[in-house]
Amino acid sequence: MASPFGVSGSELQYRKFNFSGFELAGDLRLPQGTDCLVILVHGSGGGHSNPRNHYIAEYLARHGMGTLVVDLLTRTEQRWDNLTGVLRFDIPLLADRLSQVIDATARDTQLRKLGVGLFGASTGAAAVLVAAARSPSVQAVVSRGGRTDLAAEALPLVSAPTLQVVGGEDPMILRLNVQTCQTLHCEQRLEVIEGATHLFKEPGALADVARLTGNWFEQYLHKEHTCTS
């Protein structure tokens, strides 16, 4: 990365993305001199307020990586999803929204020269993989406790190196992530955090996720891009 490990995190910036018929919101961190941007999403659309996503984003920012924690649902949609749980499983909708965010960053004068990585949790991981299969600009992918199996037909089309992190005490997701490994054709790895459950609430579990995520993006995300002013 342009910034060495151990730098302090950057100031949080609130960003709005206006699209035809809807608006999305996100929190942006851009450490000085960074050459990459990791976009973090959650299946329920509440990534903007998800404490685990912010924990990962803060870790990455301290290690010199730009981060954008973004909601893929509008506030009205989030309220509906909180009641029904329907929209978080609408992978085509979430993937389309994420693809539009990626395109918006490519048009942004502050962000367009940064290498792009994607981080997805829960069903957001499926949206991340579908978006990665569509976009050649995505250079690396990380899933945290993700329903990566829901990316279905897109999985063989993903070319970005992909890391799946799952808790050892999350048997259903572990089984589904193993199935995903058998379908992906890109460079990949499955990391199992022993003793961790789905939300990684156990002491040290989320820190392990952050470390593995940071190492993956450090290895794969910045090689082909240089950030210029």
Image (cartoon, helix red, strand yellow):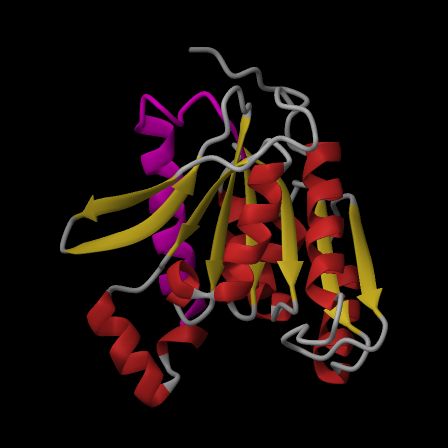
Viewer-side residue, 131 vs 165: 165
- Magenta part, dominant SS: helix
Q: On screen, 176 above or below 116?
A: below
Q: Position of residue 13 (x, y in %)?
A: 33, 40
Left or right, residue 46 beside residue 215? left
Residue 129 visible in the shown view: no
**Relative depth, front residue between 68 and 220:** 68
Q: Is residue 114 magenta?
A: yes
Q: Is residue 73 above or below residue 222?
A: below
| First to last magenta residue range | 90-116
Frontmost residue, 89 versus 81 = 81
Q: Is residue 160 above or below residue 108?
A: below
Which residue appears at 58% of the width and 19% of the height?
Answer: 225
Q: Quadrant of the N terminus?
A: top right
Outermost residue to the top: 229
Q: Residue at 25% across / 64% down in the picture?
A: 74
Q: Residue furthest left?
A: 21
Q: Residue at x 79, y 82 (%)?
A: 169
Q: Position of residue 166 (x, y in %)?
A: 74, 68
Name of the residue lying farthest toward the front: 8
Residue farthest toward the right in the current orientation of the protein = 194
Q: Quadrant of residue 183?
A: bottom right
208 relative position to 154: left or right? right
Residue 19 pos. (x, y %): 20, 47
Residue 99 visible: yes
Number of marks present in the image shown: 0
Position of residue 136 in the picture relative to residue 156 (left or right): left
State which quadrant residue 36 falls in: top right
Residue at the spot x=26%, y=54% of the render?
Answer: 24
Relative to 228, 211 lies left or right: right
Residue 214 image offset from top left, x and y in percent: 69, 43
